[in-house]
Each structure stands twice: as C-alpha cells, then as structure tokens.
Image: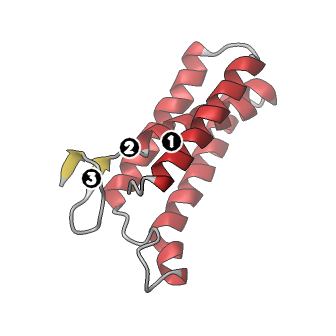
Amino acid sequence: MKIFGDNDSKKDPTLITSWFLVHLLSGIILMYIFYIYFNIDIWIATLIVLGLHTLYEIKDLFINPLFYPDTNIKKNHSILNSIGDTIGCIIGILIVIFFIKNKNNTLFLSLVIVYFGLQVLFTNLNIN
C-alpha cells in the first residue's frame, strides 16, 4: 500500500495518483455548477456532487470489470484509490464553498479546459 504513486492496482493499491487532480477539479466544477450557478442549497449541492462521484467510483470498481473482463481497461482499480479520488472530490467541494462566492465565467471555463486537458494528457500517457 502506498500513499502517493504513479500507478494503482488491486495488488499494489495507491491512495493518491495523478488522477487525484482530475477528481479534485471534478469536485470544483460540479459544485460550481450546482451551488454557484444553479444556486442550489449548499448541503443538497454537496450531496448531489458526492452522489455523482460515488456513482462514478462504483462504475470504476464494479461495472467496468464486467464489460471489459479480458482487458486492462479500468478493471484494476483499488478501493483505496477510490477513497483517495473521493477525498480529491471533497477537497474540490470545499474549495468552492470557502473560496468561490460568485459566478465567474472565465474561472469556470479555465477549470473545464484544465480538467479535459488533464484527462487527455493522462489517457494518452497511459497514466493509470
């Protein structure tokens, strides 16, 4: 078990990988959309974001292995890494709650561009 690492697997779990940044950004972006943009109550917005992120992690852990049993496509994630990804999402939520108070289209667009840029970069570099 590692706290920080480049790769995660069920045999060698890692809490925080490079993808932690993507999950942090997803927490920021989703919380921005629900709490700042749509002005949904802070607790409801938080539950929506955590619910969506939890569904994503369930897909990563349990559903992808069913559909890709003979490949390495996202079938080897550890529960520890899902916990680390969720911590990243929660930190993103907290960043919005404590530091972003008003709509800022430039900030939002910049976050979305960085989010997708990191996804493309990590996927093309085969970062697990």
Q: Amino acid at mark 1?
A: Val
Q: Left or right? Give the position of 88 relative to 107.
A: left
* Label placed on residue 22: 1
- Which image quadrant: the N terminus? bottom left
Q: Which residue has dot 2 on it?
A: 18
- Please provide percent x and percent y for residue 5: 25, 47
Distance between mark 1 and mark 3 Cα atoms? 16 Å
Is residue 66 shown to the viewer in this render?
Answer: yes
Callout 3: SS: strand
Which one is earlier in the sequence, the residue at label 1 or at label 3?
3
Query: Please, what secondary structure does the residue beneath circle 1 have?
Result: helix
Residue bearing mark 3: 14
Which three-letter amino acid code belongs to the residue tagged 2?
A: Ser
How far is the residue under mark 3 from the one under mark 2? 11 Å
- The image quarter containing residue 116 is top right
Which residue appears at 43% of the width and 86% of the height?
A: 70
Image x and y of residue 124, in percent: 49, 54
Residue 38 pos. (x, y %): 81, 30
Instruction: Relative to 28, say whether 89 is above or below.
Output: below
Q: The C terminus lies in which quarter of the figure? A: bottom left
Q: Nearer the viewer, residue 17 or 36?
A: 17
